[in-house]
Image (cartoon, rainbow, N blue to C red):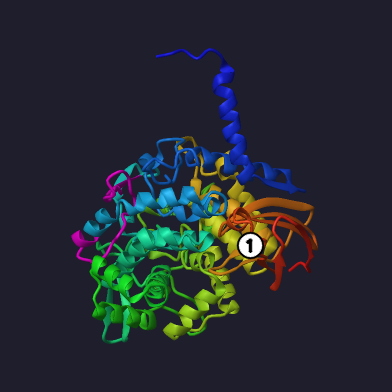
Amino acid sequence: MSSIKNFDILYKPHQARWLALWKRFDIALEGNDFVKKVLRLHAFHLLQVASTYNEDIDAGMPARGLHGEAYRGHIFWDELYVFPFYNLHAPEITRALLMYRYRRLGAAKEYAQQKGYRGAMYPWQSASTGDEQTQVVHLNPMSGEWGPDYSSLQRHVSVAVAFNVWQYFITTGDRDFLDRYGAEMLLEIAHFWSSISTYNEKTKRYEIEGVMGPDEFHEKYPGTKKGGVVNNAYTNVMAVWVIEKALGIIDKMMQEEEKNALLLKVGVSKEEISRWRQITQKMAIEMSKDGLIYQFKGYERLKELDWDDYRRRYDNIHRIDRILKSEGLSPDEFKVAKQADVLMLFYVLKFKELKDIFSRLGYPFNKNIMKKNFQYYFPRTSHGSTLSVVVHAYVADLLGMQDKSMDYLIKALKSDIYDTQGGTTQEGIHTGVMGSSLELFWRCFAGLSIEEDSLSLNPKLPEGWQRIRFKIRYKNIWFNMAIRRGKIQIVAEPLEQLSLGHQLEVPILVCNKLYKLKPKKTHTIEYASR
Ligand code: IFM
């Protein structure tokens, strides 16, 4: 082995590579040093895990980074919170991470079969082989007792894989990926959701049973041994979303021959497709007459918890599940949530998408319903997962509760630097909260929205913030943005058009008004803040 002559031989290229990454990923914020520093730290940690320099490796995005041994490096649905960061700056990284999932599509199909389903069902915890890695028993450190662990029933991980494929596609326009891998994954996952859905003759609705939603406190019905609940709202709505996307691909994006070849490959018949169409019209959502979306069937019959009493008796009630179990009770009996569950719908899907799905299914949906559900679930959530705080920060912002949103964003930013869960950061960073806090920067403050055919901004800077600056990439166009109160400067640099020597105009919506940008020119746009 040859020795290295001096430090610079290693340091100089290392420095050059980091500089290249920062040129793409960096953000600037004038007016709040804490937020700026922590967001940049989050970007740094994520880039240590996956960057343009390791995209040839067959690896997924571990929930706790490469920083510690928590979850033994396993890959969960947390990718959903992290991928937007890569999509917007170096989508080749997301593509590589999605390929980790594509290479395990066979294992996901086998897993579905083992459990009596069709299509592809990804495991809740995934590692090298792609089969289920979730533990089946769990230690409660408060009581020292081991109990059954049902978390592998979080079938919504397959929703996350499909959602990530679609988000990657609409952000990049990478049709090659969709044609070669993405469409197949989406169809296989849609097939799984169809096969796990059963038709209830009594209610005339499709139902999904035996699953857990994102709220890991509700593992089963009180007093029963069988794991899972019926009609978890997040799972059912997202299952419909996946099936609709799969139908959209075969109905609108493919020629007859291509479509038939794909259907043959995934083993989906014409009858199956018509079942998919039925499901998108008849999936059940458990909802009260006045718009409360029940987390699952029977949720309304659970008991209320005396939160004040538990707050008085315990310093920290984030893990109220463990406290209850140590007292001989079970979180299954109560209206308590570890993390956003119904509210996840508002984080993941846009208002219009939700409204369309609900109305096709014959349920009401509007902003008041969103507010009602936020107000109901917020005080019943213990935030036992760092993923909960980012979701609540986003939904509060969406519903016009900026102070609450900022409180929760700050909580999210503190999670790892202050190890707010008391010891978990030592076992690895939380990539989900890191990715999502960065996404919140673009979504809440720049009001960035990525649509299938447009990019839009609707900025709103918090009190005291003077300016934010960042660069994002949407369908092969780089947008350099500097946003002040009432004024935005944008430079668009289309990669392909410039290389072809074209000088086309680049469309962008700012506060719902269409602007056409000349490539490489600085445009100043005035806007009225939301
Ligand atoms: O995926 C998460 C889950 O939502 C909450 N518990 C920890 C997992 C890994 O981060």
Please give the name of the residue rendered at 49% of the width and 53% of the height, measured from the top-left corner.
Answer: 83
The residue range painted magenta reads 112-139
Overall secondary structure of the magenta stretch?
Answer: loop
377 up-or-down from 80: above or below:
below
Q: Residue 506: give x, y in percent of width and height.
A: 66, 64
Along the line of sight, the residue nearer the viewer: 87 or 262:
262
| Residue 119 included in the magenta stretch of the image | yes
Q: Split into 4 quadrants, where in the image is the N terminus?
A: top left
Q: Which residue is mark 1?
A: 448
Along the line of sight, the residue nearer the viewer: 503 or 223:
503
Q: Split into 4 quadrants, where in the image is the C terminus?
A: bottom right
Q: Residue 353: give x, y in percent of width and height.
A: 51, 75
159 up-or-down from 353: above or below:
above
Q: Amino acid at mark 1?
A: Leu
Q: Quadrant of residue 271?
A: bottom left
Please give the name of the residue rendered at 23% of the width and 69% of the height, measured from the top-left corner.
Answer: 267
Q: Is residue 69 visible?
A: yes
| Residue 118 included in the magenta stretch of the image | yes
Total numbered labels: 1
- Mark 1 crowdedness (10 Å alpha carbons): few <14, some 14-19, many ≥20: some
Q: Quadrant of residue 109?
A: bottom left
Secondary structure beneath disc 1? loop
